[in-house]
Amino acid sequence: MTSPRRHFWIAVAAWVVLSVLGIILVAGIQVLPEIASDEAVIENSAFVLLTVLSVPVLMFVVVGLVYSAIRFRATDDEEDGPPIHGHRGFQGVWLGISFALVIGLFGYGAKGLLDIRGSQTSDFEVQVSAEQWAWNFDYPSAGVTSKELHIPVGKRVHLVINSTDVIHSFWVPAFGIKQDAVPGRPTQIYVTATVVGTYPGLCAELCGFGHTDMHLTAVVSTQADLESWLSAQPSESASPS
Amino acid sequence: MKPGLLRAVLGAVLGVAVGLGLLALASGAGLIIEDGQRLGLAYLLALIGFLLGIGAFRFWLTWSAGREVDPAEEHAAHGRAGDWRRYFRFTTDHKVIGVQYLVSAFLLFMTAGTFAMLMRFELAQPGLALGKEAYNSIMSTHGAMMITVALISIIGGLGNYLVPIMIGARDMAFPKTNALSYWLLPLPILLVAINPLLGGFDSGWTAYPPLSQQANLGQQAYLMAFVTVGISSIISAINFLVTVFRMRAPGMSLMRMPIFVWALTVTATLALVATSVVAGAFTMLLFDRVLGTSFFRPSRGGDVILFEHLFWFYSHPAVYIMGLPGLGAILEVVPVFARKPLFAYPLAVLSFISIGVLSFMVWAHHMFVSGMAEFFHIPIMLTTELISVPTGIVFLAALGTIWMGKIHFKVPMLWVFGFIWAFLIGGITGVYLADVPTDITLSDTYFVVAHFHYTIVGGTIFGLFAGTYYWYPKITGRMYSERLGKLHFWWFTLAFNLTFLPMFWLGIEGMRRRVADYPTNLGGVNLFVSIMAFNIFLSVAVFAFNMVWSWRKGPKAAPNPWRAHTLEWQVSSPPPVGNFEHIPTVSAGPYEYGSAAVPSPGRPAP
Amino acid sequence: MSIHVAAESHGEDPVAARSNMLLGVKLGILSEVMLFGALFAAYFVIRSESGGWPPDGHERPELLLPGLNTLLLVTSSFTMQWAVRAIGRGEVARMRLALRLTLLLGSVFIIVQGYEFANNGFGLDAGVFGSTFYTLTGFHGAHVLAGLGFMAIVATRARKGLISAEHHTAVEAASYYWHFVDVVWLFLFSTLYVL
Ligand code: HEA
Ligand code: HEA
Ligand code: CUA
Ligand SMILES: [Cu+2]
């Protein structure tokens, strides 16, 4: 007949082992399929931290369940378990730990948020405007309009997003940025692309049946390439802003 | 003709006729009438006609006219035991209403689930099978119907049937209002079901304007239906609260109430306070569509984000209106099959209350990428993550009770174990979404879809199944088939996890919500998901068969087959009309297992 | 057995029935408060976002009629309370008088409101201004009508001698509701018309 303490410590040991194994497994993995901006890096690290912290929480509950299922089955129909109504110490520790976890997660999340959306400085601005079901990009500095998004690498780009009809959402997974396009109120988001290349983007807010294929293309190029591309575009007289 | 379904249907048809007739006259008189206005008036009058026909108002009408309701009539409305017709009438017995709610909820669940199968059919392969428009309508209808299921099934079904018995009362405080709250539902649900005939609605259950303003009549049908369901849940919430606070048997102190009753009390409070806000928002949206107002018309000074705020101010508490009854049912089942008192009962009660309070301070976590005012993000992130603490208590209570218990793995207990796993996954992934940096990428992807199926199915539906099996003997007076029950559990749980776990991955890989088509490289996983989803369908079919067959052929159930301590098990199965011969006097807590003072199977039957 | 049950069931016990009913009414009013809360929230948000209020091209209705209406409703709250006090003391006749007065005041309010609506010179579709103005006042008007209907019912029951010092829950319920409607109006008047 195992004593209550013994049960408890066996379970705790199992929990520690499984948690450590789990953490080793998930720590340092890249969660996001593609990372091409500072923002995406921040989000990926937040992702990893959350996963690392979730492992012990998950394991604790699972170990508790499985261990009980194995060791605490009723042997006969009549007898009842011990009349335990609670355990102050255990309840206290549980509350304390979950508070600590929450505060920690919150702190890290808040920091990440401020890194992504905090500062208002930018080196390059693009006006994004969405409509059912297409994207248009204006480059006020050059007075150019295009169907593709072209931004310089390594620069903090300021995207001002508008919609002419319903709510859309500007999303380039590789940049890790998503921002709704709201009719009647421009929204903004900043992105610092880090890898030259061409990336797919999508509309992430249901905007009618055309939503399914409301895609866009984002091109990250060096400042020089961007300049030449801009000058190659048919610059319109009435430059919007 | 006596009041009844037939007369109700006639009343509804008459209502439509009158409504359309009036507007025909109006347009004859030179007014411009839009279809939206036709639909609106026709629906309103149809609803009134339906309720008049079913006899919902006859007692109040006689009362208003200053005539005394004759007791015989009243007693007939209460329903005679054993008479099947009472289930199709305006019956005021809470047990009848409970069964009406429960059965309707399961039928609705099955219909909406069948819609889900259509969705999985479309999504099984890249490319289009049903087409985008059809898909959006099916998806929205699935969501709308399932939300209704989650809102009414446990509190309306199990709650109505059991709460009065559990607190030692003969009925709800307002039996007629109770029946009214049920009979308000059929018409709006029908309206949502037939919305394809009205052109479907493609805005999703969130119905964000301006999309929901330009979409066709089916959209308006959904808005009106939602408001009606809201009214129904408000009045049933009032009924619950008055019952719980005014009609407890002597000795049934608040801290002796079964945890299930506590859960429903908090739920009812949430429903009461939050629902009228969304009713207001949807009414404004309807006015924008029908009466030419411009609350949410940016072109004319309206504000789109405002709608999102009002909608989520209700709809986040709503997810707890869906969730809490499930948690309550689970914690009710645990002690019985672990033969141990509920662990940390006072803390669990406290956690329900604090969940209720907190859930009014987190709504904007659905709007992290919506472009709302910047200062919302950080406080909302904090409050949202804080909800994890009280919700965690529920797990603490469940685990603490199981630990060192004498576990009997009857079907209800299996669902408890399934619940703890599923709701844990749902909850933890909820924290991923509460964290703004990760939500920016995850919002509006299948990660969210997976999250809320793990929470709603894992919370509400698992709780609903646990409760349904647990109280089945009490409600039907017969035992269900244990073997079919176990088959249902294992099949459903495996299929459910294999359906929705891969969706987390899909979401991270960048598969958006609410799309009929997706990149080809995700084809394989989606096919797998669809196949597993179809397995859920089959397992539910097993459940349906088990319930129906056992009700007719199952072995007779003893009054207290589980040797439980709560009051409902101290009366016959099913309980007599009026529940108790004499109102019992409660002398001990609901979960005094293993204590010498209180002999199992509990207090001597009253 | 079931008959005897129905006889002794809670609903039948007048004291319990009374407190249940009044609690129910209070809770109902709570959800109504939230409803108007939502409408007011919408109003203030939209107002704060539009340049000035009222938006140029619109101006507010004259204060005269609404002011009169405010007077009417406030008085009606007093007459209503008078009715409750009277019936509490068992003075049925006086209660009926007070009730009729309240009905009268409320009806005049509605008529004046209707007249104002007809002569405001702007409609429900007049941008956000018309939308908020008519939706809020309209919702309130509907509540006034409901209150009047309820009072009319109470009045008929009183005429049939069904209301007494012991059985006057309906009067109290009506009074709660009526005071609520009154308070809402005070908010409407001060925010929609004055401030
Ligand atoms: C029953 C329904 C239910 C429940 C209970 C929850 C619970 C939670 N939900 Fe969920 N949610 C939905 C239903 C539900 N949700 C729905 C339907 C949507 C989509 C709506 C739509 O757009 O269509 C949604 C969407 C949604 C979003 C928006 C995503 C987006 O659209 O971008 C967010 C973001 O914060 C969120 C967060 C949470 C959190 C933090 C919880 C928390 O309450 C979870 C708390 C529980 C735990 C954390 C697990 C147990 C805790 C412990 C074991 C203690 C220790 C753990 C820690 C300290 C972490 N949910
Ligand atoms: C209670 C809530 C609930 C429940 C239980 C479910 C259950 C299921 N859901 Fe649902 N779902 C939602 C609530 C729910 N859903 C919501 C709110 C949305 C969001 C909508 C929106 O974006 O607006 C959504 C969206 C949603 C999506 C995303 C759509 C999109 O974004 O494009 C998907 C995709 O796979 C899905 C699948 C499923 C599946 C496979 C089930 C399965 O678990 C279903 C299992 C049940 C059955 C299969 C029934 C079986 C029936 C029988 C055996 C008997 C047959 C008899 C008759 C027909 C009478 N759901
Ligand atoms: Cu545009 Cu979705
Ligand atoms: Cu939420």
Image (cartoon, helix red, strand yellow):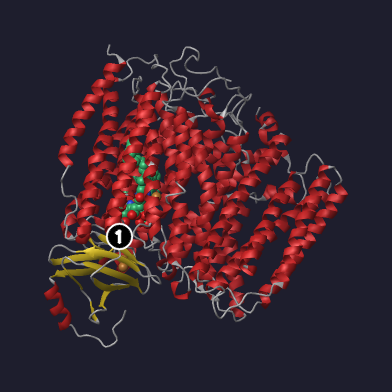
* Crowd band around label 1 with a 10 angstrom C-alpha radius: few (<14), some (14–19), many (20+): some
Q: Given the current orientation, which residue lies at the most extreme bottom position?
A: A237
Chain at numbered mark 1: A
Image location of residue C116, percent across then percent down: 69, 73
**Would residue B590 appear left or right of A186 to someone viewing this image?**
right
Answer with the quarter of the image where residue A206 lies: bottom left
Q: Quadrant of residue A201?
A: bottom left
Write the residue at 78% across / 49% down. Answer: B66
Q: Seen in the image, is B578 located left or right of residue B546?
A: right
Task: Give the quadrant of the C terminus of chain B.
Answer: top right
Q: Is residue B473 visible?
A: yes
Given residues B3 and C70, the one toward you in this image is: C70
Q: Which residue is pictured at 40% across the width and 24% down the height?
A: A88
Q: Position of residue B524 (x, y in %)?
A: 17, 53
Looking at the picture, how far across and down is residue B517, in whole percent? 24, 62
Residue B527 relative to residue B564: left or right: left
Vertical order, A71 against C82 (above or below): above
Which residue position holds label 1?
A: A117
Q: What element does badge 1 sit on? A: helix
Question: How many numbered callouts?
Answer: 1
As drawn, A198 above or below B533: below
* Residue for point 28% across, 51% down: B447
At label 1, the amino acid type is Arg
Give residue A25's position: percent from left, percent from top: 15, 39
Write the residue at 20% across / 85% down.
Answer: A234
Residue B502 showing in the rendered view: no
If the picture is divided into quarters, which one holds ligand 3? bottom left
State the residue in front, B539 or B502: B502
Is the shortest distance between ligand 1 and the CB of mark 1 under 8 Å?
A: no
